[in-house]
Amino acid sequence: MERPAPPRKRYLLCSHCDPPTYFPDLQQLSTHLTTKHGARQNFSCGQCRRLFIHKTSVIRHITEKHINQEEEGSDNEEEQRLGGPSASSPPSPTPSTSLSTSCVASEEEDGEGNTFAGGNENETPKDIVTEAAMFLLKLRSSGNMTNTSVLHIQNYVRELLVNVLKNVRQNTEEFLTNCGVSYAEAAEFLSGPTFHMDDPFANMKTVDDQLTFFCEKFGLVISEEKMLSSRIENRFDRGLRRFLPTRVLETFQSISLIDSLSFIVRNPYLRSLIFSEKASDDGVYRSYLDGSDFKNNTFLQRYPNAIRIILYYDDLEIASALGSKDVIHKLGCFYFAIQNFPPEESTLISSIFLLALAYAEDLKKPGAFAKVLTPFIADLERLCSDEGVEIDLPDGNKFILRACLVTVCADALAAHALLGLLSPSADKFCRLCLVTKTDIKNDSTCIGLLRTVELHKQHVKDVLEGRAQPKQYGVKEESPLVKVMKVPHDSTFDAFHDLVGIIQMVLKLALYEYICVRKLFTTADFNSNLNMFVFGSPDTKNKPSPSFMYSKLCGSGHTLKQSGSQTFCLLRIFPFVIRGVEEGDEILELVFLLQDIVKIILSPEVSEQHILQLENLVRQHNNLFHQLFVNPNLDIPDVGNENDDNDNEDEDGEDHEEDVDDPVGDNTNEERQEGGRRRIIRRRKKLKKGINKLHHLLHYADQMREKGPVGRLWTAKFEARHRIFRKHSAVQSNFKNPPKTMAKMFQLSTLGSVLSRTGCRTPVFSGHEERVPINNSPYYEHLLRNGFTENDSIITSKCVELCGIEYGVGLFVQLKDNTSILPSFAIIIDVIHSLEKPENVFLAVSKCTNYGLSRRYNSYHISNEFDLETTIVGLKDLASHRVIAPWTPVEDSDVNLYLYPRFV
């Protein structure tokens, strides 16, 4: 009987060495690749010549394809017995194998999503010109590079591609020669199209060429320059060497609404989102479809899937505020957003699109708004018709495009300008009713006669015909939007600026009372408490600045020099960072009322019960505020105008009482006078009246019933869209025609974002990840009940970020629980997702005991001991998608945990 041949020695080849080097085991090969070739951009398998991006990928490939398969008997045993070639011995290259498809690099994806450098045999090769265009588009849409920088990079990449292709030809020629291929066959193979490439940037050498290519290839919508007016300026004539009167054209950039919507709906994913919207069937207000305005809109009742447009206008300063161009280059920006998108898509700033761009100074002239909005109104009249606008989709089908304007979002100054009203400093300051400032002095909950559509038209007619003065009705002209919307009914109050202004005013008055009047603590103590307070990861980027000063609290004005996000964070943590305030304090109760109001207004979904609760809370808050801080009998003249852009309500007079000597010592240096060491005692501040924003709160309940949750209509996301303009202006420093330059930059950014949106966003996992079969998971039974099978595998991690929300171990979530009056909370133990579908994220949570709402902190007091039993919940099963960090008061010596949900 013939004895079986002993197993042959396995050799692994490193093809990067010249000449090739062989290694007896995988460990030596891995060490060699790290030490000798660690700086390479890609790695090649020496056994099959397949290319990989990472060294770990090629090592895993060799293990699975060339070692494990051989041990499992994948090789031909008969060939091994006869001493034939195998993958475990040094290869003997032959001409037949050298020209096979194994010599051509392929592209595939491993289990971890790493993309290899080649291409799959069944995958259609990508057009190199299209890829080059996408490369340029990404550079230009970022807003971080000048045109010169992009052109330099373009030239460098062109040279790099030529050198890479030349290097590939040389290496391939050497490889074919070593494999014994004849010179004629090698020359014929190298002369094919694989090793010859035309310049991919040939048709995109200049900026204009690139824009033309983007328009033809990707559907870029270019802005159009339109005439606004003209003026006479003294311009320097270089020939005559003197200044001469010159006619200067005033223009603006306009972007077609029909072209923009056509480009958006041609994206299959975005088009599917528009048609996926559904109204609530349980009476809860979740979107515009649940409000009365949708039910009373005859056009939307005929075409419920028509695109609903939100118009926004605001001024933007693109130059430095300390420079010489801070006024002349202030831009007026007109945006629009699509309300049909779901919340997770509409909250993206890339879902805000540019409509027009003009100089803010030019818009102050009479009739300027009407001229700028004329193209927009003309497009809307076509879209808001039964015929609509027919467009061609990429798949060859026809699509009828219909749209209508449903609301206008803007701060107070911009909204009054768009609607043809006097400024907010007028006596009749409210855009929805005819209340006066005298009325709100005497009654904090007063609502005047509502401005109905018919009444407003009559007021405009009376003012234009001279039968009434503008101040009589607070109206100065007819709004250009009267043709496409119900003015002023369809306008929405700005929840962002309204709430930020009220919060800063209330907190400043509260700090003045606690620090300057009662002397419970000092500004240094308060700043120290802010520094020591543990905010948690959800509020890491929203920490208030610990820069409070005694002189600022005693000064005029109602601002705290904090950003909007810092202001909302300060309101939430305020009870936790103040010391010495007893439970039931009347000023602290005012803060709690404001906290509850903010929760309801910013909630993504509200019920009728919540709206009724909001009406009651606003009345209590305004009455208590006027009781504590307002004295209409003060003889203080009104000064200044309300400016909603920076939340400066200097029109509110304050009662600055004289200082008297205080025999009690105080260690606050800011209170010391230069002439001596007088100690100051102060009394509670009194205002002559409240501010306009307090009255605005009275209308929010009705606006929720009409338009759904108003938190989805606030202007914070629109103001975030200004960032690309500020970034690009700082990089380009081009002030010759900023509207034209900025519009072009914005449209490139929009093009890149729309082309990249092809499906749901993939979650981003961080921390240590562990792959576990379900059979070995401690959550085996729970996972089976959530749709997993016994053959599936899961991956556990410590943190995942999805739609901008970070779910991490140690944070809390609110569970749906209809059996308890109190909300149900649980702590995250593990983050789990499916290996096959990473978007299916589950949380392993442990429930905690809720002791109820604390009257001192207006937060839920929970136990610091948790259940041993673990539950698996999906993100869709949570009562709120917001995670909550546990907070501990700075004056609490015990470890007491409190949770503050952001929404109701």
Image (cartoon, grey):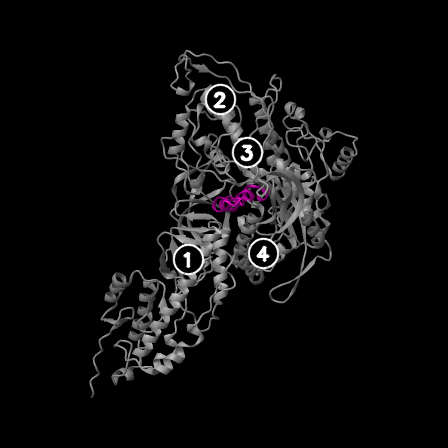
Mark nearer the N terminus (2 vs 1): 2
Say few, some or many: other residues with alpha carbon within 10 Å of mark 2 (under 14 / 14 to 19 / 20 or more). some
Circle 1: residue type: Glu
Structural distance between the alpha carbons of marks 4 and 2: 52 Å
Circle 2: residue type: Cys
Front position among marks 4 and 3: 3
Mark nearer the N terminus (4 vs 3): 4
Front position among marks 2 and 1: 2
Label 2 close to label 1 by CB (< 8 Å): no
Disc 4, SS: helix
Residue 370 among those drawn in magenta: no
Q: Residue under label 1, please give it.
A: 781
Disc 3, SS: loop
Side (left or right) of 291 relative to 821: right
- Residue 584 appearing in the image: no
Label 4 close to label 2 by CB (< 8 Å): no
The magenta region covers 710-735
Q: Is residue 867 above or below residue 655?
A: below
Structural distance between the alpha carbons of marks 3 and 1: 55 Å
Side (left or right) of 558 relative to 489: left
Q: Quadrant of residue 327?
A: top right
Mark nearer the N terminus (3 vs 2): 2
Q: Residue under label 3, please give it.
A: 646
Front position among marks 3 and 2: 3
Mark nearer the N terminus (4 vs 2): 4
Q: Which label is found at residue 554?
A: 2
